[in-house]
Image: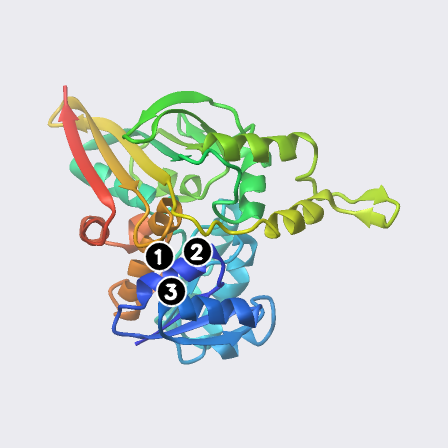
Amino acid sequence: MRIAVLGAGIMGTTAARLLAPEDADLLVLDADEGRAKAAVAAAGRGESAPVDAGSSGLAEALRGADVVATCLPYRLNLAVLEAALEAGCAYADLGGLFHTTLRQLDLHDRFRAAGLSAVVGIGIAPGVTNLFARIGADRLDTVTSIDMLNGSIDEDDSFGVPYAADTILDELTLPAMAFEGGELREVPAGSGAKAYRFPEPIGELEAVYTLHSELATLPRTIEGVRDVRWRLALPPAIARGFGLLAALGLAGTDPVETSAGPVAPREVTLAALARLPRSDGPHRDAEATVVEVRGTREGRPAVFVGEATTRPVDGLSAGAFGTALPLAVAARWLAEGRIAPGVHPPEEGITAEPFMGELAERGMSVRLDLKTA
């Protein structure tokens, strides 16, 4: 069994560390050869190689791998999915921020015809969120609404980049999606503010609508649902910092004239954020994902609640561990042939309860609760 990790940033390095104990050959690929080697060193074993995900050489680099776990900015996911198909290997990623996910699902028939399997969006959110929605739907007789929330804190209360900065900027600026009354519609990013008390130690945070992949699939995969909503609550210092960047127009992609010529503000912002040092100290963050599925059971109103909470583990931050663990487990399931051919969202491709059980065994705190009126 050979598993390739594509991308050697925070998530790729974490995924490589989590995959290292598996009985599999590990290959880490990144455009920056030094980053790839550093990820292998952090994992304690494996091979590394330089490869640009946007190059024609990606398929060749993937040839011979059973699966590729993709940890790149979401805009590259479709190209990597095509390369995996060409290389004849299975595929998993951390999400396509709605629009890319829809385009990826269009490759379903081609993957199925090739006998290859892919799962799109299998981190904590999307991923665990989708699986909680599936478990809730399976435990209820009817489903009317699904509310998903993710909240995190950092006891250091300092600004940082918890995952791809480009994705965070898009989440805070692109129109979000909400499915209400059986209709999918755009809503302003940052709207739908809701004070929500997350499991301890996170406590109450304000969560808002952001663009997310769950809305691309759950309205059609969960039968009968009329309302599907996603809200995000970043750690306050990070929310304030990225909010300020967006308010100043520094997330914009249209070039502005400068003394050095036209420059896209976002390019400067991303370059500056990439220069921020990674924390070498102990991680002090915590993250919780909550999904509430409402409907009926045996003719009575009922609500299913799924909660997943993570804290720092073995030098990994709570956010990185919680996001990379589902990807690592899914990569092994794919390599073992446990997922049917085709391109699937998590709630259709993965057997939810055994998968969540494995996450719990490996350090994620998972709670499943069903209450009837």
Residue type at tag 2: Met
- Name the one closer to the observer, 353 or 10: 10
Give the residue pinned by disc 3.
16
Q: Quadrant of residue 44?
A: bottom left
Question: Does residue 185 show up?
Answer: no
> At which x and y percent is residue 46?
38, 75
Question: Does residue 37 show up?
Answer: yes
Give the residue pinned by disc 1.
327
Which residue occupies 48% across, 63% down? 8
From mark 3 to mark 2, how far is it between C-alphas?
Answer: 9 Å
Note whether 221 is above or below 338 in the view shown.
Answer: above
Are the residues tagged 2 and 1 within 8 Å (C-beta)? yes
- Name the one closer to the observer, 142 or 242: 242
- Name the one closer to the observer, 221 or 329: 329
Crowding around mark 3 (Cα neighbors within 10 Å: few <14, some 14 to 19, many 20+) is: many
Element type at marker 3? helix
Crowding around mark 2 (Cα neighbors within 10 Å: few <14, some 14 to 19, many 20+) is: many
Element type at marker 1? helix
Left or right: 39, with 305 as reference point:
right
Give the residue pinned by disc 2.
11
Element type at marker 2? helix
| The C terminus - image quarter | top left
- Name the one closer to the observer, 68 or 143: 68
